[in-house]
Image: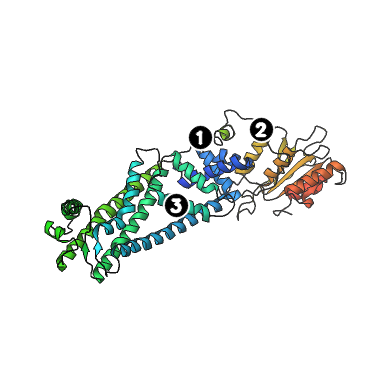
Amino acid sequence: MISSARRAHTPSISNGSSFNSYWTAEFVRLREAHWGPLEDSREVRQARTQGTGFTQKVLLRAALLAKREGIEDTLGHWRRIARLTLVAMLLVTLLAGAAASQGALGDGSRPVNLLLALAALLGLHAITFVLWLFSFALQGRHAGTWLGQAWLWLTKKLARGPDSALAPRALSGLLDRNGSLRWVLAATSHGLWTVALLSAITGLVALLSARRYGFNWETTLLSADTFVSMTQALGWLPGLLGFTMPDETIVRLSNGLHVLPESAQTLWSSWLLGCVVVYGLIPRLACFALCFVIARRKIAATTLDTSLPGYADLRERLQPSSEKMGVDAPAGDDYQASIRKHGAPGLKDGQTGQCLAAGLELPADLPWPPRPLLPPAHDLGLIDTGAQRKSLLDLLFTHPPRKLLIACDRRQTPDRGAIGFIAEAAGHSAGTRILLLPPGGEHTDPRSAAWVQRLVTAGIAASDIHTDPTTAIAWLTMDGTHD
């Protein structure tokens, strides 16, 4: 009966759904848990029609609600703030690395204590790195990832706006459940440390190239043999990578009591650079790469835990074991249906659409149709049951009409279900008008006035509410989209 079909634009949810779609679904779940269920009859209907499985239907419903409620904008704003925060932290770590190299070497006016310089460059790095390694054996799963946690915390503070606090909660919860939160925070932390150490090494090379530094070790308690053993042990791995290391004689003479040749200072410069590269940069870079790869794989393998409250409650509505009649979800006393256009307005050129008419719960004493319907109008008959309402809405969703005329019994009190059905049906049509029967009544009697008031509140213009069947059917059958 319908000659042209057109689906409304909907978010694309493929079988290999993106991580953002899971994040959106988790955000919607948390929002509904905090503020109560959203009115979603239209979105549930669309998800049931287009989704191929329960998980995909949940994701599609969430995507539709996110677009309608502005959640997409909230998540997009949070992502932008997160990127800007990360860039700012990268700049800070660059400056911190340069400052560390300057602090470790000084201005060249005094000899550089080798062990103190090494502690200044690698001390905090070593502590956080060891804590991170121990976190795999301890309960503190995020120990040693303070920079990653600081990134999340700063983003939470800077990302202001409606429901902005739910974005990081949804993200953290989702990442934690699939086991990737540890790796994301670790990759962020290791990445920032890598940048800081690269900056420190660059600063060391620049300072050592531009100034003359003297190096020594100083102690009151330890013997020269201790420093010989320590420097040789620390220099073994850098030596394998090509960094030149001082021999035992140079180490013994570097106690601050002897004047060393320039070649000795060069050897100590190489030893210091080698230690920072081997014990600082390389471990951080390797751990960053490892954590980044693991985080990406775990994120790519993200699934929806449909047993969680909020998801499990949707199963009977999105994938019912049997069709049910009645309202899709309870509504509060202050609930008011409203028309939300669903892609029907503005038919494309060359698409004529259909002109459809239906009677909504009309009693036997009101004949339907009250006047013969001539082409291009089509009679859909009487809509009396919940199943018939659902079938009609499914038809309107897949084949949006150009004109839709719905007849109602004005002698009945307009209930919430009837107004909600009319509003949802009108959302699928380019033009909708209402016929109040029996004919001849005016809008002044209490029940007719109630119908008009509820319909106007829902979004039907008062001029589109008729009491004369001839006028209403003439509009339905005449040429033109609306008039």
Residue at numbered disc 2: 387
Q: Horizontally, is 298 left or right of 311 in the view?
A: left
- Vertical position of residue 219 compared to residue 392: above or below: below
Q: Position of residue 320 (x, y in %)?
A: 58, 31
Callout count: 3
Nearest-to-viewer mark from 1 and 2? 1
Which residue corresponds to the image point at 47% horizontal and 42% vertical from the top-left? 174
Residue at numbered disc 1: 306
Say if residue 18 shows up in the picture.
no
Quarter of the rendering occupied by the C terminus? bottom right
Nearest-to-viewer mark from 3 and 2? 3
Q: Earlier in the sequence, mark 1 or mark 2?
A: 1
Q: Are marks 3 and 2 in contact (CB under 8 Å)?
A: no
Question: At label 1, which amino acid type do we have?
Answer: Thr
Residue 411 numbered mark, or none: none
Look at the numbered disc 2 and give the secondary structure of its residue: helix
Look at the numbered disc 3 and give the secondary structure of its residue: helix
Residue at numbered disc 3: 150
- Vertical position of residue 124 compared to residue 327: above or below: below
Looking at the picture, tell me which residue is in the foreground, 283 or 223: 223
Question: At label 2, which amino acid type do we have?
Answer: Ala
Q: Are marks 3 and 1 in contact (CB under 8 Å)?
A: no
Q: Position of residue 276 (x, y in %)?
A: 26, 56
How many residues crowd around disc 3 within 10 Å: few (fewer than 14), some, or many (20 or more)? some
Question: At label 3, which amino acid type do we have?
Answer: Ala
Looking at the picture, tell me which residue is in the foreground, 202 or 370: 202
Look at the numbered disc 1 and give the secondary structure of its residue: loop
Which residue corresponds to the image point at 72% horizontal and 53% vertical from the top-left? 482
Residue 36: name its quadrant: top right
Inter-mark Cα distance, 3 to 1: 31 Å
Q: Position of residue 83 (x, y in %)?
A: 45, 56
Q: Earlier in the sequence, mark 3 or mark 1?
A: 3
